[in-house]
Image: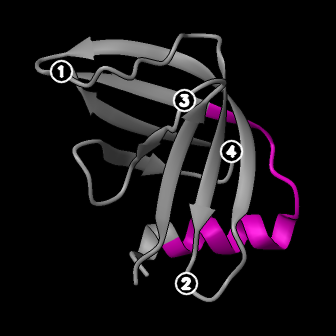
Amino acid sequence: PRAGLRVVPANGLGLELVGGDARLVEVAVDHVSFTVPSAETLKFVEGGSVRLRFDVPGQPEHWVLGTVRRLAPGEGHYLYAVEFTEQGDEQAHLQAIEALRTGV
């Protein structure tokens, strides 16, 4: 199994950013950016709060709170940037980021 990342709005099931139609563009210690196809019905609002669930094989779920800082339409997709506002356990957070970067 690979590491996964799901972004979850205030209401709704959320969207998987690894292995689905949405694409993870950048993963950093303090933010992520991703694209979502324009046809996707789930939209995130600039300035809105989201939760992010990092799934790392062999580790407990790691939840992070974030704020949508940028929303930019592209050709056939939307580009989002989410700034982390609360990361919880620092060690678990760093492990989750590293797992996504290396594609574990």
User: Helix, strand or loop at disc 4?
Assistant: loop
Mark 2 neighbour class, 10 Å CA radius: few under 14, some 14 to 19, many 20 or more: some
The part of the chain drawn in magenta is 83-99
**Residue in view at x 47 percent, y 72 percent:** 3
Spatial CA span between label 3 and label 4: 24 Å
User: Helix, strand or loop at disc 3?
Assistant: loop
| Residue depth check, mark 1 versus mark 3: number of the one nearer the observer | 3
Q: How is the image coloured?
A: one colour
| Residue depth check, mark 4 versus mark 1: number of the one nearer the observer | 1
Mark 4 lies on residue = 30
Spatial CA span between label 1 and label 2: 31 Å
Q: Is residue 97 magenta?
A: yes
Q: Is residue 78 magenta?
A: no
Spatial CA span between label 4 and label 2: 22 Å
| Residue depth check, mark 3 versus mark 2: number of the one nearer the observer | 3
Q: Who comes first in sequence, dot 3 or dot 4?
A: 3
Mark 3 lies on residue = 12
Q: Who comes first in sequence, dot 3 or dot 2?
A: 3
**Residue in view at x 26 percent, y 25 percent:** 40
Q: In which quarter of the image is residue 78?
A: top left
Place of residue 6 in the rendered image (x, y in percent of width and height, measured from the top left): 51, 49
Q: Who comes first in sequence, dot 1 or dot 3?
A: 3
Mark 1 lies on residue = 39
Mark 4 neighbour class, 10 Å CA radius: few under 14, some 14 to 19, many 20 or more: some
Mark 2 lies on residue = 57
User: Helix, strand or loop at disc 1?
Assistant: loop
**Residue sticking out furthest to the bottom:** 58
Q: Contact (CB < 8 A) between labels 4 and 2?
A: no
